[in-house]
Image (cartoon, rainbow, N blue to C red):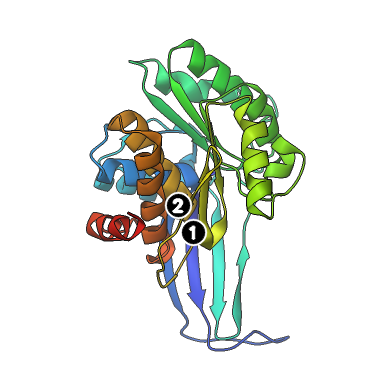
Amino acid sequence: MSPAIDATVAVPAWPRDGAVFKDVAEEENIGGKGLNVARWLALRGADVACGGLLGEENAAPFERELARCGVRDVFLRVPGLTRRNEMVVTPEGSFKLNRAAFPNLATDFDAGAVLDGADGEPGVAILSGSLPPSVPKSFYADAVRVLKERGWRVALDASGDALRLGFEAAPDVVKPNAEECAELAGFVPSSPEDFRRASAIIGKHVPFAVISAGESGAWFNGEFVAAPHVEALDTTAAGDTLLAEFCWRMWGKGEELGAAASWAVAAGSAAVTMPGGSPPPPVLVERLMEEIK
């Protein structure tokens, strides 16, 4: 629901008051959590569509990216621009400027129209990312209920009230990080015992609790899968790739939980080696999977 053009700007020093940097290098990527998920699933050979909201005034680059990846475009066009975010990278560190998505969206906007693209044969729906200010925090909860009634498997990757309310609608998978567990389990896990307890609490309401634990790995229904060592370049799409691979392995390939979890961590680990959320080469995922085994 909140895609973005993500720009990365490299500057030679940490900016001071009044600083002007000339001839800076900039790289643009078409992003957003849902789009990251769709790109990876398409690369894996899935029949995949991607939807949400797109601003009419700059939809073209998103349309080109979806076509390039072989992803069906079921986005709902709305007036205005899709947001543009900036990551500023310096030798001393980096910071990111995230704009609000669709700030001028009408308050009476019919968010449910976004689900019109899910009227076909039931499959797997991955609901991910933040919600624009004008979209009700209950949007994901309503979407989970509608999709489940239509026979879909549903995975949810959100935060704050959108995660809490969506979780109460009982999706098939939720993927919080440690901090987001506070919304679902009532505390932030920090030890293996904590993660197992949080998984058990979350697992009372959903079949699959996937808790990401950063660079160390992830917990799948209380079982930890350690991440292989890689040289991390950009964590932008790591969690999205992990969740997409998990769903692809579970329901696209029909694999057992343990195998799906290992493949998911291998894919997420490979993703951090790529710039700007670009999908990693599948051969790298296969190599990292051997390390996990």
Front residue of 271/263: it is 263
| Mark 1, secondary structure of its residue | loop
- Dot 1 or dot 2: first in sequence order is 2
Q: Can residue 19 be seen in this snapshot? A: yes
> Which residue position holds label 1?
236
Which of the pair 72/42 is nearer the observer? Answer: 42
Quadrant assignment, res 160:
top right
Q: Residue at x 41, y 20 (%)?
A: 118
Q: Position of residue 190 (x, y in %)?
A: 69, 55
Residue sitting at x 46%, y 85%: 23
Residue at horizontal 70 percent and vertical 29 percent from the top: 107
In which quadrant of the rendered view does residue 245 lie? top left
Q: Answer yes or no: do the residues labelled 1 and 2 have beta carbons within 8 Å?
A: yes
Could you give the CA–CA distance between mark 1 and mark 2, rounded to whole angstroms? 9 Å
Q: Is residue 253 left or right of residue 167?
A: left
What type is the residue that disc 1 sits on? Thr
